[in-house]
Structures are given as structure tokens and as C-alpha cells.
Amino acid sequence: MNYKQCAKELLTHENILIVTHRNPDGDTVASAAALCSALRRGGRTAWLFRNEQISEKLLAYCAEFFAPEDFSPKYTVAVDVADAKLLSHGFEGKVDLCIDHHPTNSGYAAMTLVKPEKAACAELVLELIVCMNGELTPQEATLLYIGLSTDTGCFQYANTNAAAFRAAAEMLRMGADNAKVNWSFFRKVSVARLKLESMIYSGLRFYREGKIVVATVTLRMLKESGAVEDDLDDLAGLSGRAEGAVLNITIREQPDGSSKISVRSNEEVSSSAICAVFGGGGHEMAAGCTIFGSTDKAREMLLNVIDEVWK
């Protein structure tokens, strides 16, 4: 679908449930909340699925949109979710429409609006709201600025392009509080985060003469630093700060014994191709997956796959 077709499709339905992805980031949460707000202004009954993994920082912006327990949806929309297996824990049922920017989107929804050239799903939702309502409210603009700025690393990542800057300008024109968002999400960190970063940096491992950098985050490190979910934003970018790094990997130990993997790269190697081997995906220069095993085992498996993918 194009934007106008998607907007028309949304406004022909009632009792809409909007679902985010597991391990939710700013783009999936804030874009979903902005869409929910816009649908309500368009006369629809819309709610967010209560994703229990949303951090406290993001809860302040989206909690008001959570569906009550007795809500019975008739139409389901997934926002920024590339595959059905990535849908929020606890969600069951089919997805009628998926709005996404991942080139690896599996086409699991009955209908899709996928724009892989976009830096963030927030850009798609911006276009949809304009089609539905003409303008954004300041709250919606702020939400979408959260989505766009977090997915571009405050406009520092390689996915940042001219279209992303134009979208940000439109969000600011319509009332986005960029100063508050930038301060909260990019300028201020807790003491626990600082302690955790020191542990991560001291444990970095380097391969191929520094072109590959691997960071590990264990449950022990989280406990010793006192870090909670709100302190874990953008961990994937830390190891990539090392001069000479081409491919950086963050391996985060999970309570169930698995390892959550985040891969970042430049155009020399495909992050998506590496993660696809383990059933994950994403973008060429930013992707993720889960490996069922310890962090040491995950690191060994990743390095073996990298040797195959990146000759």
C-alpha cells in the first residue's frame, strides 16, 4: 500500500489494537503511541497492547494509551515489527496490518506498508497522520521525534539521510519538544549506567586487528552496576566508538540463558546477513538476533559466521 491507501484502510476500522515488538525501543513504542493518538482524533477507538518490557523512560510517554483489560480488538496493527516471532510477549492472534521500515520484513501481516529506505518507522507514521488528520498535535510530534531520534542515534548513525532531517524539521514545526527529548534520551545518564559502561569498555574484545569489536553485557554486570532497563538504551553503539572498528557486536545475557545480539557495521559488511543465519534480521548496517546459549558460546558462533559472511 501507499500512505493514502493505508490511511484509508485504518480509518475504515474500529476497535484497533496496536502492537509493538519485543525488547521495545523508542521507535516502536513512540510511533505506536503517536498512531494511536491520531486514530483517536480520526474518530476511531484505538489502544496499545500492554508491552511489559517497555522501559520507565518510555512509559512516561505511552502509558496513557495502554488498552484496558476488557478491550476486545477487531483490527490489529503492528508497528516497527519485522517478523511475527518478534511481536510483544503475551500477544496472540493475527496481524491485519504491519507498518514497518525493515527491509527484512517477512510479510506476515495480511496487509503491509513497508518503506525500507526510511531511517525510522516514525517517518512512516508521520506521513500517515498527515494523510489522516492533516497536522500532528505537539504530543504526536514529540512522540515521533523520540522514534526518529532514537533510531538514528540522535542523527549520528549511518541510516540518517536527508529525508530523516526533513521529517525531523516537520516534527519540530508541528510542536515537537526536541530539547526535552534530547536531554532525557541523549544527554543525561544515571550513575548505574556510567558504572555499566566502564565494565563494558574494560571487557571489550578485538579481532581482525581491531576491525571487529565485541562487547559483552552479563547479568552479573547489571547486578553489580545497579543498572535497570532504563539504563540500557543504545548499548549497541558503545563498542563501535573504537577507532578502526568496522563491525561491532554487543552480546547481552538474558535470564533464560540465551544471548541477545546487536550487530552494527559500515557498508563493508552486512549486519543483516550475519543475523539472518541465526533467524534474526534488520538493516544492512544494523541488525539483531537471539542465540540460545551463553555469551561465550554466542561470541564463538558469531565469529565463525562472520568468517563465512565477511571473507
Image (cartoon, rainbow, N blue to C red):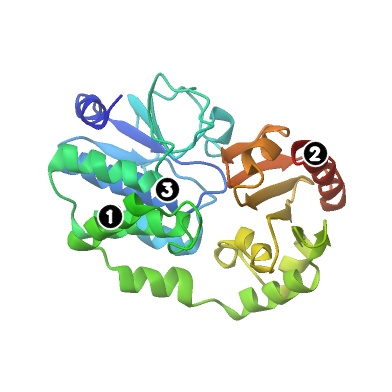
Give the residue displayed 30% in from the left and 32% down from the top: 16
* Residue 201 in view, yes or no: yes
* Percent position of residue 86, x then y: 56, 36
State which quadrant residue 138 falls in.
Answer: bottom left
Badge 1 amino acid: Arg
Badge 2 amino acid: Val
Q: Gap between marks 2 and 1, in whole Å?
A: 38 Å
* Percent position of residue 92, x then y: 51, 28
Q: Gap between marks 3 and 2, in whole Å?
A: 27 Å
> Pointers 2 and 1 in contact (CB under 8 A)?
no
> Pointers 1 and 3 in contact (CB under 8 A)?
no
Q: What is the residue that sits farthest to the top in this orientation?
A: 110
- Image quadrant where one finds the C terminus: top right
Badge 3 amino acid: Ala
Residue of label 3: 119
* Percent position of residue 243, x then y: 68, 69
Label ID, residue 305 = 2
**Secondary structure found at label 3:** loop
Residue of label 1: 166
State which tag comes first along the sequence, 2 or 1: 1
Measured along the vertical axis of the image, is residue 184 above or below residue 110?
below
State which quadrant residue 5 falls in.
Answer: top left
